[in-house]
Amino acid sequence: MTGTILFTIACLVVLGLLFSVVLYFVAQKFKVEEDPRIEIVESIMPGANCGGCGHAGCHAFAEAVVKAPSVEGFFCPVGGNATMAKVAAALGQEAVEKEPMVAVVRCNGSFGNRAKTNQYDGYASCKVMSALYTGDTACKYGCLGLGDCVSACKFGAIKVNPEKGIAEVDENKCTSCGACVKACPKGVIEIRPKGKNGRRVCVSCVNKDKGAVTRKACSVGCIGCGKCAKACPFEAITVENNVAYIDFTKCKSCRKCVAECPTGAINAVNFPTPLPPKPAPAATPAPAPQNETENK
Amino acid sequence: MNKLIVSPSPHVHGKQSTNSIMMDVVIALLPATLVSVYAHGLNALMLALVGVVSCVLIEWLIQKFIFKNTVGWCGSAAAVTGLLLALNLPPTAPWWLVVVGSIVAIGIAKMTFGGLGQNIFNPAIVGRVFLLISFPVLMTSWDASGSWFAVDAFSGATPLGAVKEGLANGLTLSQITADNMSFSEQFFFSTGGSAGELSSLALLVGFIYLLCRKVVKVTIPLTIIATVFVMCGIFHLVNPELYTNPVFNVFQGGLLLGAFFMATDYVTSPMSTKGQIIFGVGIGVITVLIRYFGAYPEGVSFAILIMNCVVPLINKYCKPRRFGEAK
Amino acid sequence: MKRTFRIGGVHPNDNKISKNAAIEVFPAVETAYISMAQHLGAPANPVVAVGDKVKVGQVIGEPNGFISGYVHSSVSGTVKAVEPRADIAGNPVMNVVIAVEGDEWCEEIDRSTDIVRECSLTCEEILARIKNCGVVGMGGASFPTHVKLNPPKDKKAVALILNGTECEPYITSDDRIMRERPVEILIGAEIMKKVLGVDKCYVGIEENKPEAIASMSAAAEKFDGIEVVVLKKKYPQGGEKQLIDAIMHRQVPSGALPIDVGAVVQNVATSLAVYEAVQKNKPVIDNSVTVSGHCMASQHNYLVRVGTPISKILEVAGGLPENAAKVVSGGPMMGKAVVNLEAATVKANGSFLIMTAEETVRKRESNCIRCGKCADACPMGLEPYLLNKLARVGGLYDELEKERIFDCIECGCCLYTCPSNIPLLDLIRINKAEVMKIMRSRPKK
């Protein structure tokens, strides 16, 4: 009996030693030499591997930053300026401050604003739907509300509001990685600066149809009338293809355009006071996302 | 007029649904169930009912309280598992045995993998094997006193069990004579074995129904039976005193039940015809090996479980013949 | 034994409820909307301006590139507008809108009903006529016929196959023309045989059309080298590759064209259009269209001028019933759901189906039970369940390519047969497009 036990123990010990030696040599053989700074940078990274920076993941980003002569041109949208400062410090460089950005859904065509003209009955994916036809409303440009952006978002920052049927961004969670922008077949989502104190103005419409067509399809569509462009003191607004666009590099968030817009397609977000000049219904600000997150 | 519906093509759908398929399987198992009730009375009926009810109930409870989603739930699939499990037990087994089997079959073999379509092993077989290992006496013997009919044959063990025991005691087959049954006895009705093994004819009727309803294909059962027959034939020719004859092996020990209804389970069998042939041959070979050389008299359940393991691999390497590829 | 293709296929109920409705000439419309994108390839360039007077058969759109085609006016009248209009899917397409005045045809067109069999034109002249008359594949793909009849010099056709299978349920327009105009179809085939330099022509017809088989067989007796082949009823027999497999027992390899196995497939309706173009100088200005559905009061086959609004066709056919839920252009397996009923017909429209919600609404999706029915049904020998699984992960284009997603012909058999109602084809279709795009972007070896 004792002999068997001893024999078993001896066998296992010999086997263990044998394998550890083999493992040691294998590990030596396949060892990959890597710049130690890559590991350091990677440890600073958020580790979301979202690809928002344009690299395959955090490791690829770290590799690229270490190899590049300077951190300029590199930005981690998830970690933001704080992470980039740490990365720059680790590499002995100065970081370049970048304005915080946020994904903006440029469509306000909720069920109430944009009536359904037909009923979609296929796989719930915007991509499938838009490959098939123009969509279940008379607007062929707006948000389809089937949530390809939701499944693309790794941070749970975008949701399709079931009462409105359009995607909404939770700006506290959004890292502006741009995954939703790529996922949206309609090109409705744009990455824009968050603005001072989160205050910003944006045209919530991408409808390129002529004004009359847009008006029929949606009550808050941009009809390309150009009133906003005339009202803008900073020449930040251009109207092209029947739709206005606010250049965020020029916009000073004065909100003159918001008051001017006849359909309410221009949205002002996170302003504490209502508009002073025209108490138009158009000026209703978008729902404040902060409240939503608090509720969760 | 209402709003037009718009969807990608195709705009029509075939008649089969998961539910209709599972109900077809239940219907196909009814002849075998009726035979077992005919032979063993109300206890067999009670087992079948308890099996179905407990499986459906357990799956529903797990869906409701653990998955918190009963939307796409398919009760008929659980009913099939329950009925199969009951048919895999001795007809005189106590009711709690089925319940224990159901808990293992549904709770462990099916729902831990994610429910319908996700399991690797056939739930009914996992349940049966669990019971077989945990309650070997209850699972392999029974008294025939509850029967409506006077039953004289094999009150202690299955024919396969009797053979195994006899051989282990140094007897030869001609001395045991357990495999010396008439063909009609084997095919139409015999009293040895678990509830689903009584009548090969009843199983065959059910299987033909499934074939006609285009629920299953004949590939897997055919390859299993052919493999067992051929392999046993070879062994039997080499030494008829040690190895039972092939006909006896095909009709005994739940081979037909396993081949017709359990190996053909969609979820745990390969997709392509090539894969199904490999799967069937594998089950046949392992069954024969266990029966002739293993510790257990019966090997179909183990064979199916073992082959279930390799199904993902088979699916990966056995592709259907693509259009345009040379034969 | 009747022939059929060897891999996969399904047997949907054929619902040929309009098969006994003879083709009626559709009444004239007030305004015709003629699309410039009636063929595969680049849309034609409109060559008329607002205010121009046009006659029936006059060219109003010229080809814009090699794979493109002529578009002709199907009515006489005044051009009211040249503007983008929404097609059946709502996408804007350039249209010439013509206010109809009378019915004045171009003089070159032979409007008599006499059947002309003699053809003294050379192959080049025939091809030029086919091109100038804007003949496209009428089976639905609308590939320009003159391109298909002019294969690269290094590839030799062995046989012409006329596709009279009409394997899609409901549609009967090809059945009707085969019953009503068999000789003209076969003269078209004879002309195409001449152009291709082949001796053999097979006409594939499924067994559920005995009248068409009888009439085509009777007509074929007077022609050399034309054989009517009766095929088993199985969908998608009308798929080009499936039909070649069924008739010639040859499988077109992946990525190759039918001409690589020596076959050229043309629809019977295309053959009729070729006859009219070559022998009568008549461009494609009308085509036969089935208007059918169990919910409709009556079933119809119409000879409809190109550019007739769908709403007008439905109105003449008895109006959309109260319970109609879906209008499909084409068959129920591969047809497109119509979003915009104001869109007008194009050359390749073969049918409009009206379906109720009960007939067509998809059932709720449930778990895949790995039954493998989709793989059994796939006529290309693919594994739709696997493609769908990979597609749902997203981005696995290399794996999808390895599983040959590009071979998918989008016939819909997988989705039709799936007992769990998984929308297999929906995802496969868009991922196939993505994979094809990646494959095309690669440098050619």
Image: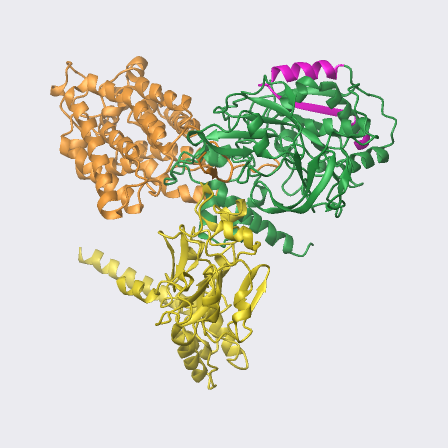
Chain colours: A yellow, B orange, C green
Corner quadrant of residue B188: top left
In the displayed structure image, the side of residue A227 where residue C250 appears, left or right:
right
Corner quadrant of residue A102: bottom left
The boundaries of the magenta stretch are: C193-221
User: Of all residues shown, which one is farthest toward the left?
Assistant: B145
In the displayed structure image, the side of residue C45 where residue B15 appears, left or right:
left
From what the image shows, is residue A128 above or below residue C248? below
Q: How many marks?
A: 0
From what the image shows, is residue C343 above or below residue B43? below
Which residue sits at x=43%, y=32%? C357
In the displayed structure image, the side of residue B136 where residue C425 appears, left or right:
right
From what the image shows, is residue A268 above or below residue B177? below
Which residue sits at x=60%, y=42%? C87
Viewer-closest of B320 and C196 = C196
* Location of residue C241 in the rendering, given as x and y in whole percent from the top left corner: 63, 34
Corner quadrant of residue A3: bottom left
Viewer-closest of C221 and A269 = A269
Visible residue check, residue A247 = no
Q: Quadrant of the C terminus of chain A?
A: bottom left
* Location of residue C81 in the rendering, given as x and y in whole percent from the top left corner: 68, 45
User: Of all residues shown, which one is farthest toward the front?
Assistant: A278
Viewer-closest of B94 and A280 = A280
Q: Quadrant of the N terminus of chain A?
A: bottom left
Visible residue check, residue B19 = yes
* Location of residue B161 in the rendering, given as x and y in whole percent from the top left corner: 23, 28
* Location of residue B117 in the rendering, given as x and y in whole percent from the top left corner: 35, 40
